[in-house]
Image: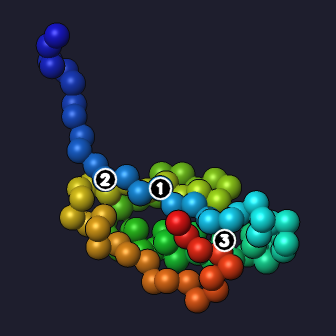
Amino acid sequence: MTTEGINRKLTAILSADAAGYSRLMTEDEAGTIQRLKSYKELISVRVSEHHGRVVDSSGDNLLAEFPSVGPSDRWIAPRPSDHRLAIS
């Protein structure tokens, strides 16, 4: 097997989803969607500040990549004050 023509890329991947999403949607769909949107916006900004990029953001999941582990371990988002929607 040859490695000619193969471009390798080392990245760090972040996958975040909302804990208890189905239960929260049942209890308060509109409020859960609004909080989730706010958290995704906050996380997207923090990811970008640390040289990462959001690859996908569907449903209650957010997938981001960083060019290396260094920036990814410093992206840490502020803890949400509303614990009904916790990022796990």
Instruction: Report how many numbered discs are placed on residues in the image.
Output: 3
Q: Earlier in the sequence, mark 3 or mark 1?
A: 1
The foreground one among 42 and 26 is: 26
Determine the image quadrant of residue 62: bottom right
Report the amino acid beneath label 2: Ala
Residue at disc 3, secondary structure: helix
Q: Earlier in the sequence, mark 3 or mark 2?
A: 2
- Which residue is disc 2 drawn over? 12
Q: Residue at x 29, y 68 (%)?
A: 73
Q: Position of residue 2 (x, y in %)?
A: 14, 13
Q: How packed is label 3: few (under 14 Cα within 10 Å), some, or many (20 or more)?
A: many
Q: Position of residue 79 (x, y in %)?
A: 49, 83
Give me the disc on residue 66: none
Report the amino acid beneath label 1: Ser
Q: How packed is label 2: few (under 14 Cα within 10 Å), some, or many (20 or more)?
A: some
- Which residue is disc 1 drawn over? 15
- Which residue is disc 3 drawn over? 36
Does residue 67 appear in this view? Answer: yes
